[in-house]
Amino acid sequence: MPTYRTTCKVGACEPFCGLEVEVEDGQMLRVRPDPDHPVTKGYACIKGMHVQDYQNDPDRLLHPQRRGSGGWERLSWERATAEIGQKLRAIRARHGPASVATYWGNAADSLSITLTNTFCQGFGSPNSFNVLSLEYTDRGAVARRVLGNENLILQPDPSRAHFALLLGTNPLVTNGMSLLQRRPRISADLQGIRRRGGKVVVVDPRRTETARIADLHLPIRPGTDLFLLLGMIRRILRSGRYRGDYLRRYATGLEPWLELAEGLELEPLLERTDIPQAQIESLADEFAQADGAFVTTRVGVQTGHNTTLTEWAVMTLNAITGNIDRPGGLYFNPGVLDIPKLIERFTRRRNPAPSRVGGYPQIFGGPPASVLADDVLSDDPGRIRALLVVAGNPVLSFPNTAKIEAALRRLELLVCVDIYPSDTASFAHYALPAATVFEKGTWHFLTTNFEPYPYAEWKHKVVEPRGEARSEWRVFKDLSRAAGVPFLNDPLLDRAARLLDSLGIDFSEDLLFQYLLLGKLDLGRLKRTPGGIKLGEVRYGELLGRGLHTPDRKLHLAPEEFVRALHEALRSPPDPTPDFPLLLISGARRAASFNSWTHNIPALMDKLKGNWATLSEADAARLGIAEGERVRVTSPTGSVEIEARVSPDVRPGVVAVQQFWGHTYESGMRVSRSHPGVNVNFLHDDRALDRFTGMPVFNGTRCRVERVNGPTSPELPGR
């Protein structure tokens, strides 16, 4: 029985753990962790141990489908491609290029991301939406202003740190301290900090799995992380514990921060964190004195209030203590490719216009997804009328579900390219079957900066595509020609592709990979090397020495628009109200779940069985709610009914409901529909958006909880 070495692919789960895959008669039978993988070293989580279940899932989408009067009907790839291309041409001709939009979700790899974006840009449309705008573009907004380029994303170095301050991140479950960082053996990293005599502090409204092993857990009120960070920064600046020599050499903007430290009246805001001021100041002192420290966040903070300003404060705290571009602090891995330059090359023909609704800038390739529904539902003649979704599930991912449902129904053309007939596909006019990573093989080149060191790894194909599933490369090459737009939005490349194809030479994705690796590495060698190839070490000092993209090659710590916005944010803290006295958070990820991606795998669903509302013991007692009772959770945006659970791990004043459930649509995912859960995004407001990025708030939504008479609804999980 042949065994192949490859890597895991569960949505966009960052560790990409090395796997050994047994194949018999063209089918994946068993997987196990690869003990010889240089990065993951024999680690894989429960989701990785079941990738063969989604690969072999009988519910997979295996043939092109078109919605007819009697439901879905099968048609050929040629017919589907021709019809979609014709409709796209007609929509653009009647309503202009911005009437066409695309969206890629968390299961997209580097090639499908590139193909989706450039397909949209080929129409001249600026509307290439993506999932990062729901949870990550605050990093880009800060990096653009402070470091000079939105793609200079820093990551923590826990292997040499003596202090880790983790805000809104639960790495023992998510397998990474910071979004996109490949750090699968995170438990060992945290234990290493403590063995060196260092300290791990977790700031989170929940007592998470990571908080249980930390030296200190601070159960902060959701949405107030900015105030905590400002309190620490003020303490360090006022006490003179900042690195003045470092800042004079590498940064500008210290003076405005010193003025803020002297002028800000933070005491009322620090009280809102529910963390004593003395403890915040002690935390600041320890952080400043540590020999290598970092503060980092993940979606618990990044999907909260004032997210961009909070990330700016994170960058500032790391900078004033001299912890940027140093061992044990934050570093930038230049990777195998110069990603900022590569993205600039691929986007030179992009329409850079901001979003028509809200005027938000494009970050990481597109405008914020949170404004898509308003655009579709508007009366503007140039509104979005056609949407192509790749490896995403907007109806379960976007805020204000009722509005996104209405928007999806109004579209003149909705096409879903996915491995499953998803919840979103239940609204679609066409569903096109995509090959899995195990059926095509690829290199995830856009994440090269998030490896632990300069490193490239080929994800090996191990089986042939099932049914008529195709790689996104072939899907978009054919769609581009049918729609009359240049493939990869590059007319010269498009002509070369047509010429090669006419000569019987397949213009395949391998030619693109060879081009990307030119002068760096031989593609054949990369494919022949299981476990990847290490191409060097991270060299500290290079980022600050010559890697910044600001005009003066220095950190810009006080962008004027951030300073102005800070004063406004401090005047309007995200407090509960008498009508909505609780704060709703929607993270609380579980080890067996990755967004909606894993919900059709029976072995994982047996452990998950939907979602529920978790309340503190104090709030449950005050409201007269018992374990397992049905409750109604209401926000200014909507209301849902769901089972209640009571836990000492949630702080008072907070209710936690996990996102990405609500499989109540007529999808083809039978296991998901057997335990649908409840879509909490009915409660989150798509108008509560970050001023710099348009990112929505999923953590800190005001709400109330009330008992509902009667037994728990049968579609909800039991006790």
Image (cartoon, rainbow, N blue to C red):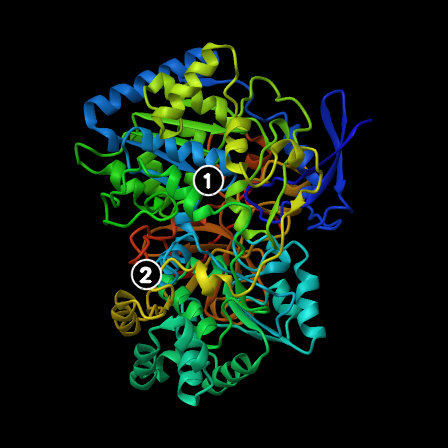
Instruction: Residue at 35%, 60% (x, y): give it.
Output: 550
Quarter of the rendering containing residue 430: top left
Q: Is 472 above or below relative to 227?
A: above
- Is 67 situated left or right of 361 in this image? right
Q: Going by the picture, which residue comes out furthest to the front? A: 519
Instruction: Residue at 26%, 68% (x, y): give it.
Output: 560
Quarter of the rendering containing residue 307: bottom left
Q: Nearer the viewer, mark 2 or mark 1?
A: 2
The quarter in which the N terminus is drawn is top right
Is residue 384 visible from the viewing direction of this image? yes
Which residue matches tag 2? Answer: 551
Q: Position of residue 376 (x, y in %)?
A: 27, 36
Q: Which one is earlier in the sequence, the residue at label 2 or at label 1?
A: 1
Is residue 306 visible from the viewing direction of this image? no
Quarter of the rendering containing residue 202: bottom right
**Secondary structure of residue under mark 2:** loop
Instruction: Residue at 43%, 74% (x, y): give it.
Output: 229
Q: Position of residue 633 (x, y in %)?
A: 42, 56
Q: Going by the picture, which residue comes out furthest to the right? A: 1
653 or 232: nearer the viewer: 232
Say which amino acid is labelled 1.
Answer: Gly
**Secondary structure of residue under mark 1:** loop
Which residue matches tag 1? Answer: 105
